Amino acid sequence: MGPQGDIGKRNALAMKHYNQGVSAHQKGLWNRAIQEYERALEYDPSPEGKMLILFNYAMEIWVSKNNFDKRNGASVPDEEYKDAIKVVDILNQTISLYEELSEDEIMNCDLPLKDIYDNAKNNRNAFCGYGQSKRKKDGSFRLRNMDRIIKSIKEGTILKEEEEKSGCFIATAACGTPLAEEVIWLSRFRDNVLAKRAMGVNFINFYYKISPPIASWVSRYNLAKVMVRTLVVRPLSKLARLFT
C-alpha cells in the first residue's frame, strides 16, 4: 500500500516524482527515471495519473535495460524477452485503467488520456508479436519487428500497426516522450488545422520525409534536445495552442 493521505495530496506527490522522472529521462538517466516512476506509483494516484505514470514507466524499462547499439535486430537473450513481457504487462494495466473510466471522467481530465491509451495499445500490440515467436536453440528468442521497435524507442517515435507516420518525430525526440504537452498540442494542430488544408497536407508529407533522420540526431545528444525543445518546440507549441 502506498503512502497514506487524501487523493489530492497523493496525486500532487505522485506527479512531483513523475516530473522528476521525465527530467531524468531527458538527461539520459534512465535508471533514475525508473526509480522516480516507481516512487510515483507508491503514492497510489488517481487512475488518470496512474495511466500516465505507467506508460512512461513501461517505456523506460525497455530503454534502460536493453543495449540498442549492439543488437542486430534478429534475436534477444532470455532476460530481454522477460523485459518485453514485463512491458506488455504494464501496458495492459494502462489500457485497463482507461477502459474502466467513464466517458465524463475522460472528457473532464486535463491529461491526454486518449493519447496515452492509443500509444499503450500500439506499443502493446507490437510487443505482443514477440511472444508468438519460438525459442531458438541458443536460448534466445526471435522477435518480430525488433528493428522497428528499437528504432521507434530510440527516436521517441510512436509505433503504429500499419505504419509509423503518426508522431511529431522531432518534438517527441526533443521532449523524450510522445505524451509531453508540447507534442500533444503540435499533434492536434497537425490533425485539426494542417490536415484539413491542401498546403497543410503537403507540409505534413514533406515533414515526414525529412524529420526521421533529424529526430534520430536530436535523440542522441542531450544538448540538442535542450536547444530544440527550448528554441523550437516550445514556441511552436504555444502558437499551435492559440490556433487549435
Image (cartoon, rainbow, N blue to C red):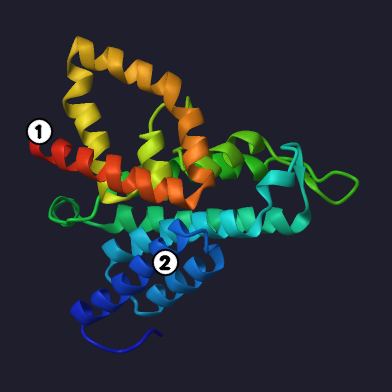
Residue 238 percent across, percent down from the top left:
16, 43
Q: Nearer the viewer, residue 113 or 176?
A: 176
Q: Residue furthest bottom?
A: 4
User: Which secondary structure, mark 1?
Assistant: helix
Disc 1 to disc 2, C-alpha distance: 31 Å
Residue 48 percent across, percent down from the top left:
27, 61
Quadrant housing the C terminus: top left
Query: Image point 16% across, 36% down: which residue?
Result: 240
Residue type indicated by callout 2? Gly
Quadrant of the rendered image containing residue 190: top left
Q: Earlier in the sequence, mark 1 or mark 2?
A: 2
Quadrant housing the N terminus: bottom left
Residue indicated by mark 2: 21
Residue indicated by mark 1: 243
Q: Nearer the viewer, residue 24 or 138?
A: 24
**Is residue 17 toward the left or the right of residue 124 in the image?**
left
Q: Can you say whether 84 is above or below 3 in the image? A: above
Q: Nearer the viewer, residue 225 or 189?
A: 225
Query: Image point 54% across, 53% down: which residue?
Result: 88
Query: Image point 34% across, 59% down: which residue?
Result: 52
Residue type indicated by callout 1? Phe
